[in-house]
Image: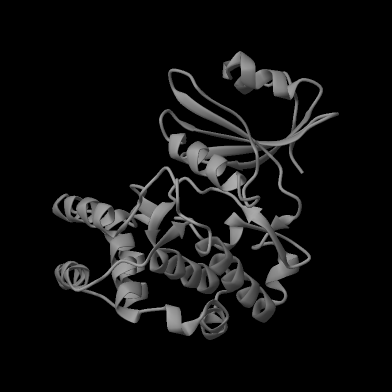
């Protein structure tokens, strides 16, 4: 465990209102890469997570986390602030550990069912007053622009069975023209690390910044992708589909959401395999 001293030079650049949460606290670096850093801040009277990104990256995450907190399925928002270069987002820690932890990966069959049931539970949240829309039309507009700019995530295209980018794009447009959206509240980044479990029971979701009102198949696609990525096997997709409800899943719309993801980069981020 990497416990970083409180007098770290890095923390001196944090806004004053964020640094006050670090006083007398143990700080564990959970993640630190070019897109974001995550810290666990355990103080005498608080247990928080701090996420730091480039400026203007987490406004939607703060909004959706707060919205879903009202349903008891996201952590409480403690503080959200920006300075000239960064966003800082503090939330309470949910009880449990993420679904990609070894204790859950060791029981992949059970995990795939809980993973699906937890997604279905989210999709049953009433979308009334949901403050953000992240639907198929919005995704297609972005995907068309990214295609013209030459953006495509080749790993996702291979996962979908495509070798020709132009054919994949044409299929995406055709599928969209013939689709009807099944609008629910989506997570937007539904993968095992973003589901928190305790003894295989869902305690909540994190990283909901790409969520909002959208098509359920977007989350289903990423859920299936996460299972094969984290478990290194496609053997559990049928259990996931059965637990979620096979009758709720349209294969054409599932493929559409996969293609949208490929052209939009991972979860709508400008990240593409070179």
* 59 on left or right of 177: right
- In the rendered view, would you say 150 is above or below 51? below
At horizontal 85% and vertical 29% (from top left) the residue drawn is 44
Q: Quadrant of residue 244?
A: bottom right
Q: In the displayed orientation, state which residue is furthest to the front.
A: 128
- Residue 67 visible, this orientation: yes
Name the foreground residue: 184 vs 74: 184
- In the rendered view, would you say 146 is above or below 62? below
Percent x, y of residue 147: 18, 56
Percent x, y of residue 42: 78, 34
At horizontal 52% and vertical 41% (from top left) the residue drawn is 33
Name the foreground residue: 96 vs 66: 66
At horizontal 33% and vertical 61% (from top left) the residue drawn is 261
Percent x, y of residue 179: 24, 71
Scheme of colours in the image? one colour
Name the foreground residue: 238 vs 228: 238
- In the rendered view, would you say 117 is above or below 197? below
Name the foreground residue: 158 vs 93: 93
Q: In the displayed orientation, state which residue is furthest to the right.
A: 44
At horizontal 43% and vertical 49% (from top left) the residue drawn is 210
Quarter that holds the C terminus? bottom left
* 44 on left or right of 97: right
Q: What is the count of numbered marks? A: 0
Q: Quadrant of residue 219?
A: bottom left
Percent x, y of residue 9: 63, 18
Quarter that holds the N terminus? top right
- Residue 234 visible, this orientation: no
Q: Quadrant of residue 112?
A: bottom right
């Amino acid at each position: 465990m990497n416990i970083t001293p409180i007098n770290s030079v890095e923390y001196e650049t944090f806004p004053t209102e964020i640094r006050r949460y670090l006083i007398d606290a143990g700080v564990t670096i959970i993640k630190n890469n070019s897109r974001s850093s995550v810290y666990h801040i355990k103080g005498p009277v608080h247990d928080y997570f701090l996420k730091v990104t480039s400026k203007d990256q987490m406004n939607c995450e703060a909004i959706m986390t707060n919205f879903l907190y009202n349903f008891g399925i996201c952590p409480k928002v403690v503080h959200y602030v920006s300075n000239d270069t960064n966003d800082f987002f503090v939330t309470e820690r949910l009880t449990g550990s993420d679904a990609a932890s070894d204790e859950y990966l060791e029981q992949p069959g059970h995990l795939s069912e809980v993973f699906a049931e937890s997604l279905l539970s989210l999709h049953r949240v009433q979308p009334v007053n949901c403050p953000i829309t992240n639907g198929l039309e919005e995704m297609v507009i972005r995907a068309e622009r990214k295609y013209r700019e030459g953006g495509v995530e080749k790993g996702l295209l291979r996962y979908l069975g495509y070798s020709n980018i132009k054919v994949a794009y044409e299929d995406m447009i055709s599928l969209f023209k013939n689709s009807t959206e099944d609008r629910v509240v989506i997570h937007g980044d539904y993968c095992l690390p973003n589901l928190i479990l305790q003894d295989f029971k869902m305690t909540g979701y994190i990283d909901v910044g790409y969520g909002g009102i959208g098509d359920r198949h977007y989350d289903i696609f990423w859920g299936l992708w996460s299972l094969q990525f984290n478990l290194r096997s496609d053997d559990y997709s049928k259990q996931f589909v059965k637990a979620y409800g096979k009758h709720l899943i349209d294969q054409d719309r599932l493929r559409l959401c996969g293609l949208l993801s490929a052209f939009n980069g991972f979860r709508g981020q400008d990240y593409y395999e070179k």
